[in-house]
Image (tube, rainbow, N blue to C red):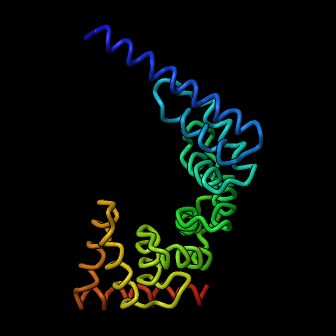
Amino acid sequence: QPGNDVSRRSRRQKDIKEALRWYRKAAEAGISEAMYDLSWVYANHWMVQSVRESVSWLVKGAEAGNANAMLDLGLRLANGDGVAKDGTLAMHWLKKAAEEGNVEAQAHLGLGYMSGLDGNPPDYRQAADWLGKASSQGSASAQLGLGMLYEKGWGVNEDLDRAKALYSQAARSSEPEIAKLAKARNQQLANPRNQELASQRNQQSKSRSEIT
């Protein structure tokens, strides 16, 4: 059996090298999807794992117009994953992917505007716009973020009923952390006293903004 294990490992190594050869051939021919796939293999396959190669092909795929590559590059830049952290450049690539219709990029872009990822003050109107696009296409993270904007009255008119509806949608997410946060926000808003306090806080915040 040990001999069989060695033989199987040898075949797997040969298979992955052959796959890489074809991916590289397609990528070097200018096929952006192959560039993205090649980046993914270098990032995730233990036999050939290389952060440098992964990032290199990811940049090439993004520059060639692949929306998935743009998204992944934006997230790497936002988190400093294998590259220097750069919020401004992260937003640049997330926006390009979002404009290509990538729903996940639209959600991350909206959250980036919401948090001021690029180092600028939060832009809640832009956040609401992009989160709205992603939310309507089923993104739970966008539904959660948009719900918070409606709850707080940031970039949109305060609408606690709309916030609760968005939280209810997000609470059905298959992602446990998002579902948990959405359920918690909904439970808080379900309490009439909490609704009243939230509305009072938002009104006070608006009044202070108008004064300044």
Q: Is residue 189 left or right of residue 48?
A: left
Q: Nearer the viewer, residue 129 or 40?
A: 40
Q: Where does the image place residue 164, in percent across and percent down from the top left?
A: 34, 84
Quadrant in which the N terminus is drawn: top left
In the displayed structure, 48 sits above or below 123; it is above
Q: Nearer the viewer, residue 6 or 80?
A: 6
Q: Residue at x 31, y 79 (%)?
A: 168
Which quarter of the figure has residue 148? bottom left
Q: Where does the image place residue 34, in percent across and percent down from the top left?
A: 65, 43
Q: Is residue 196 left or right of residue 27?
A: left
Quadrant in which the C terminus is drawn: bottom right
In the displayed structure, 72 sits above or below 17; it is below
Q: Residue at x 64, y 35 (%)?
A: 23
Q: Residue furthest top?
A: 3
Q: Residue at x 53, y 63 (%)?
A: 104
Q: How many marks?
A: 0
Which quarter of the figure has residue 203? bottom left
Q: Where does the image place residue 21, in percent across and percent down from the top left?
A: 64, 28
In the displayed structure, 116 sits above or below 153; it is above
Q: Residue at x 37, y 89 (%)?
A: 160
Q: Is residue 151 left or right of residue 64?
A: left
Q: Nearer the viewer, residue 100 or 207?
A: 100
Which quarter of the figure has residue 92? bottom right
Q: Where does the image place residue 88, in percent across and percent down from the top left?
A: 68, 55
In the displayed structure, 74 sits above or below 25; it is below
